[in-house]
């Protein structure tokens, strides 16, 4: 079953960035350039942290605004980048309300979570977990 | 070092001319590795003999090391400068996001030269450097506001460091600190005053680059081993659970918790200010430095009513650790936890080193008790043990001095006692105020012999406690050699730069493996040589600037108040000092003759 990364309890986040370094290390490098997950303070560390991850939307705005269809839908949610089609326009990054489309400055292309869960394995405080992604109920016009 | 590792890049900033440039300095990092090993070499290059610590020629050097950005708990930045507090070697370490941000910006070190004619804050954003006008930020009442304003104006949230000073730094109080990420500090020896002398209100560093490794598989394996040790082994448990505040009760139990200016080693309010009580009633959040899963930073949530406004409250979040608890808790006889936290809050607001502040106020309280000074000097304040509100008033007067007495307090306890007397109970070592351990001779010998006169230089307090627990007898020579060995090894950790709290994880073997992953080949002997050489260079700098171990002042008070290892003997301390310098630094003529 397809999975996605989930922020289970952001109030347990201590801001250690172990998840960010793990994401970069997945590619075999140190540092942070490769990270597709972001942790920042919620307006000052005294207020705690915000953890930015791709939530694998069923109808992702990043894909809808891509002029070259480089972001391919992954049912039931999320996207996969076909880098050879990407022209680096940045529409996707601007469209994501969470800021979960990170940017690879050296390639001038987006870098997006691949839902592997490597980061969650390095979260010492159970903030993150992989969860199964079930198809969303069909939206019916007129409801809600 | 791998050919594409940006560690070798040194950023030079001239604040006088508003220019910056980058130099490739593989030589520095080959010889000194990083951190302290590189910073002392840069200090030799940049700081001419006899430099005025508050003059434009005093450099500020920040250095990180090869393991930063690659391995967990390699999370510290080393700052070096000439200290306005001691007039000698200034070295202070801080975490927060400072180290990772500097490394991710693509540098191994930053050198700040000169002084700006007008207030500035500096932004280092990868390859770009911006000089921003800070005249509107100058004089802001709280250092926290400085952080808040800059946070909203600059980019890089989450991966940047915002180092800033409070008004204490602007005013040149010699023990003003630099605050980074609200809760960490380049606390000791007055870096904040050096910032202020350069009219540098803040330094922002941001970046997000990648770092090469020599062997991906080996890198991941070594990483996992270190990460497991950090999160699963008992080695880091103390820092993880109660934090350093867990020291309060055990130290009190053995009579090693300096109380009321070390008139006693026991404090009847220890339970109240203990890590246990703070965790039970105040712990509001735990946070971590960048790339450290341990999260030793403990924040107290303090709910304060507005006295004249019913149903109006504020909740402040305050960082606490053993040293601040000692310095403005037991040392000032404050057992009211909420009061103690508010004294800490005031030191944060103005940007003072809390340890030097507490010790200086403890001396002032005793000086007033003994009649060396009167209410005339204290501007009417009746400084008295436990009276936290009066201490808050005194801290404000240190920063806005109404008279010469507070101006003297603003230069620390060594200076204040030289003017008003009471040197016997002025608790400073090499000019730096005492840390929170009265464990025995080794603890005090660390303060006396350590290159920074810091308890973290060689951790003699730990030697004392082991001796007390095992019933061992310490000898001057034995202590001197153990401290020398420890301080040398810590130069290696400070060059990587690994947090000293992680010293149990980063054994010499682990350090070698981690360095290999970064493409750096060092034998155990190489590392030992690096440690010894780095420490020798620091002492060569200190001798050049007038340090003389024969003239080290030993405050009588530490010989009067019994320690867990009995009453300390001055001859023991003098013999150990002589042995430490003669054995450790025979190459330096002053020490050979000891």
Image (cartoon, rainbow, N blue to C red):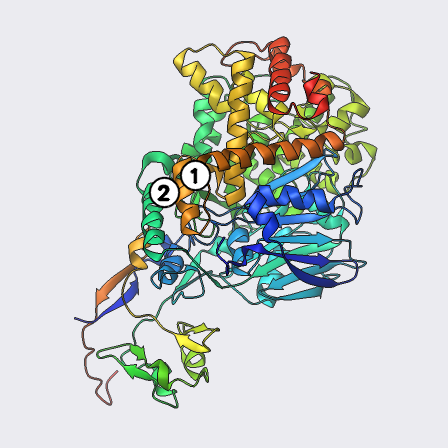
Question: What numbered label is drawn on residue B177?
Answer: none
Q: Residue B312: tell me if it is visible.
A: no
At a point 44% along the width and 73% down the height, the residue shown is: A103
Q: CA distance from mark 2 to mark 1?
A: 8 Å
Q: Residue furthest left?
A: A1
The C terminus of chain B, quarter of image = top right
Kindly indicate the quadrant of the structure image that contains residue B193.
top right
Q: Which residue is mark 1?
A: B502
Task: Please tell me which residue lies in front, B96 or B574.
Answer: B574
Name the residue that disc number 2 marks: B230
Check if mark 2's residue and mark 1's residue have beta carbons within 8 Å: yes
Residue B239 image point, x, y percent: 41, 38
Badge 2: few (under 14), some or many (20 or more) residues near its Cα, within 10 Å? many
Residue pictured at 80% horizontal, 37% vertical: B50
Secondary structure of the residue carrying tag 1 is helix
Q: Which chain does the residue under circle 2 lie in?
A: B
Label 1, residues with CA under 10 Å away: few <14, some 14-19, many ≥20: many
Q: Are marks 2 and 1 on the same chain?
A: yes
Front residue of this view, candidates B481 and B504: B481
> In the rendered structure, which disc, 2 or 1, sits on the residue that comes first in sequence?
2
């Amino acid at each position: 079953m397809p999975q996605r990364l989930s922020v289970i309890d952001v109030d347990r986040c201590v801001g250690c960035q172990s998840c960010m370094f793990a994401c970069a290390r997945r590619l075999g490098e140190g540092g942070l350039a490769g990270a597709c997950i972001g942790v920042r303070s919620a307006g000052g560390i005294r207020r705690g942290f915000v953890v930015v991850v791709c939530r694998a939307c069923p109808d992702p705005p990043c894909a809808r605004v891509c002029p070259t269809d480089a972001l391919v839908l992954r049912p039931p949610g999320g996207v996969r980048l076909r880098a050879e089609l990407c022209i680096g326009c940045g529409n996707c990054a601007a469209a994501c309300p969470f800021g979960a489309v990170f940017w690879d400055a050296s390639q001038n292309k987006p870098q997006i979570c691949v839902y592997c869960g490597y980061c969650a394995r390095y979260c010492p405080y159970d903030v993150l977990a992989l969860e199964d992604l079930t198809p969303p109920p069909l939206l019916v016009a007129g409801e809600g | 070092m791998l050919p594409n590792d940006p560690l070798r890049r040194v950023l030079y900033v001239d604040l006088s001319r508003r220019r910056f440039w980058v130099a490739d300095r593989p030589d520095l990092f080959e010889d000194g590795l990083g951190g302290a090993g590189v910073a002392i070499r840069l200090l030799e290059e940049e700081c001419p003999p006899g430099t005025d610590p508050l003059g434009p020629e005093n450099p500020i050097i920040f250095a990180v090391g090869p393991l930063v950005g690659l391995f967990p708990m390699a999370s510290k930045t080393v700052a070096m400068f000439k200290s306005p507090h001691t007039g000698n070697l200034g070295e202070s370490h801080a975490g927060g996001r400072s180290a990772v941000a500097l490394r991710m910006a693509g540098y191994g070190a930053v050198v700040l030269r000169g002084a700006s004619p007008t207030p500035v804050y500096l932004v280092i954003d990868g390859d770009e450097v911006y000089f921003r006008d800070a005249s509107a930020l100058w004089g802001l009442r709280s250092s926290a506001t400085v952080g808040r304003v800059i946070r909203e104006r600059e980019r890089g949230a989450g991966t940047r460091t915002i180092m800033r000073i409070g008004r204490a730094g602007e005013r040149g109080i010699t023990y003003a600190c630099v605050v980074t990420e609200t809760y960490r500090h380049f606390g000791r020896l007055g870096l904040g005053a050096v910032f202020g002398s350069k009219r540098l209100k803040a330094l922002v560093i941001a970046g997000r680059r990648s770092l090469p490794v020599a062997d991906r598989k080996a890198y991941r394996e070594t990483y996992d081993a270190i990460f497991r040790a950090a999160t699963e082994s008992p080695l880091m448990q103390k820092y993880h659970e109660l934090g350093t505040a867990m020291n309060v009760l055990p130290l009190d139990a053995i009579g090693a918790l300096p109380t009321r200016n070390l008139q006693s080693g026991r404090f009847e309010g220890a339970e109240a200010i203990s890590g246990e009580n703070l965790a039970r009633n105040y712990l509001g959040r735990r946070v971590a430095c960048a790339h450290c899963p341990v999260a030793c930073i403990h924040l107290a949530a303090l709910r304060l009513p507005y006295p004249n406004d019913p149903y109006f409250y504020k909740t402040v979040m305050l960082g606490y650790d053993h040293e601040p608890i000692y310095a403005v808790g037991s040392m000032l006889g404050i057992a009211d936890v909420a009061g103690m936290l508010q004294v800490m809050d005031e030191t944060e607001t103005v940007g003072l080193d809390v340890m030097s502040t507490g010790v200086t106020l403890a001396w002032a309280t005793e000086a007033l008790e003994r009649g060396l000074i009167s209410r005339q000097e204290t501007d009417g304040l009746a400084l008295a043990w436990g009276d936290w509100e009066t201490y808050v008033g005194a801290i404000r007067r240190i920063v806005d001095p109404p008279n010469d007495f507070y101006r003297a307090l603003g230069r620390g306890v060594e200076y204040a006692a030289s003017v008003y007397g009471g040197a016997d109970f002025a608790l400073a070592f090499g000019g730096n105020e005492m840390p929170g351990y009265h464990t025995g001779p080794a603890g005090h010998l660390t303060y006396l012999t350590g290159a920074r006169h810091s308890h973290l230089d060689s951790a003699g307090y730990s030697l004392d406690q082991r001796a007390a627990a095992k019933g061992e007898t310490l000898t001057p020579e034995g202590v001197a050699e153990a401290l020398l060995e420890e301080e040398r090894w810590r130069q290696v950790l400070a060059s990587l730069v690994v947090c000293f709290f992680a010293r149990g994880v980063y054994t010499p073997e682990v350090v070698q493996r981690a360095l290999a992953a970064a493409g750096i080949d060092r034998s155990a002997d190489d590392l030992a040589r690096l440690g010894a050489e780095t420490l020798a260079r620091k002492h060569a700098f200190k001798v050049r600037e007038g340090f003389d171990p024969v003239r080290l002042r030993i405050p009588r008070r530490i010989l009067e108040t019994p320690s867990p290892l009995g009453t300390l003997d001055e001859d023991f301390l003098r013999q150990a000092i002589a042995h430490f310098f003669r054995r450790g630094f025979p190459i330096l003529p002053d020490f050979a003759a000891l």
